[in-house]
């Protein structure tokens, strides 16, 4: 198997893993075995669309399957959080949304093909914080196999790049690291006494 074949296989595995991860995650949301953060998915929906636009503007055509999947998947997930999610107006939520919005305004004023990618990664990180906090305090509210597939998809995403740049490299590492940290947090052992009532007797494994 040559590099071209590996690249093609990795591209399909990355996009496929990300797509299935959203299906599993949304299924968990609808069944109410997980409770996602509205603020997180609102920010991720907006940022993923703009980040995709930034990558396309920067000429990126290789590492694009996961950004496309995230743009569509995050938008659909956010729509479900309107009914099934929680939060959105806590101090942390408002701060993260405001910070993300401010960074995007900066992009609009000072944007270059490279700058949007870096700013959107920062805004994406702001979206991660509410979920990070919940994963630390109430991990069962985010425990879902979708996170494992998010992680797998971002691992394969490393192999979709044939020519590394600073922007694509930072994006790939950031996405993998964020999914790895979240997966570790939500799947760490948790005492049954700390589990939210709706989780007892149910499993997301």
Image (cartoon, rainbow, N blue to C red):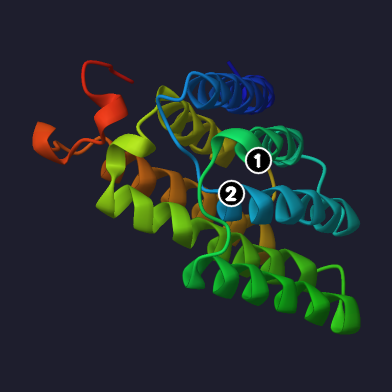
Q: List the residue tagged with mark 1.
A: 82
Q: Is residue 165 visible?
A: no
Q: Is residue 121 left or right of residue 143?
A: right
Residue 33 higher or lower than 159, as above or below:
above
Which residue is found at the position 69% from the left and 50% from the top?
A: 163
Q: Is residue 199 left or right of residue 87?
A: left
Q: Which mark is residue 38?
A: 2
Pointer 2 and pointer 1: residues touching (CB < 8 Å)? Answer: yes
Picture quadrant where residue 109 is located: bottom right
Question: 116 or 144, which is in the foreground?
Answer: 144
Q: Earlier in the sequence, mark 2 or mark 1?
A: 2
Where does residue 127 sit, x and y in percent of width and height?
Answer: 57, 59
Residue 204 higher or lower than 182, as above or below:
above
Q: Is residue 28 visible?
A: yes
State the SS at label 2.
helix
Which residue is found at the position 51% from the left and 46% from the top?
A: 86
Question: 171 or 198, which is in the foreground?
Answer: 198
Question: 186 or 194, which is in the foreground?
Answer: 194
Picture quadrant where residue 74 is located: top right
Question: 52 or 22, which is in the foreground?
Answer: 22
Residue 1 higher or lower than 182, as above or below:
above
Residue 129 higher or lower than 140, as above or below:
below
Where does residue 89 sit, x and y in percent of width and height?
Answer: 57, 63
Q: Is residue 87 left or right of residue 60?
A: left
Q: Quadrant of the N terminus?
A: top right
Picture quadrant where residue 5 is located: top right
Where does residue 66 sit, x and y in percent of width and height?
Answer: 67, 36
CA gap between label 2 and label 1 equals 7 Å
């Amino acid at each position: 198997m040559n590099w071209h074949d590996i690249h093609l296989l990795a591209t399909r595995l990355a996009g496929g893993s990300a797509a299935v991860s959203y299906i599993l995650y949304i299924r968990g949301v609808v069944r109410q075995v997980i409770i996602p953060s509205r603020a997180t998915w609102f920010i991720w929906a907006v940022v993923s669309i703009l980040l995709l636009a930034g990558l396309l503007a920067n000429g990126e055509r290789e590492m694009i399957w996961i950004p496309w999947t995230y743009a569509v998947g995050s938008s659909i997930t956010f729509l479900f959080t309107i009914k099934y999610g929680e939060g959105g107006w806590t101090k942390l939520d408002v701060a993260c949304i405001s910070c993300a919005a401010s960074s995007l305004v900066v992009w609009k004023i000072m944007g270059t093909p490279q700058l949007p990618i870096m700013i959107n990664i920062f805004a994406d990180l702001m979206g991660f914080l509410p979920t990070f906090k919940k994963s630390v305090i109430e991990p069962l509210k985010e425990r879902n196999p979708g996170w494992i597939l998010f992680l797998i998809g971002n691992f394969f995403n490393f192999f979709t790049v044939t020519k590394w740049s600073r922007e694509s490299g930072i994006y790939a590492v950031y996405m993998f690291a964020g999914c790895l940290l979240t997966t570790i947090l939500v799947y760490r052992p948790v005492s049954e006494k700390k589990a939210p009532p709706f989780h007892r007797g149910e499993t997301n494994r």
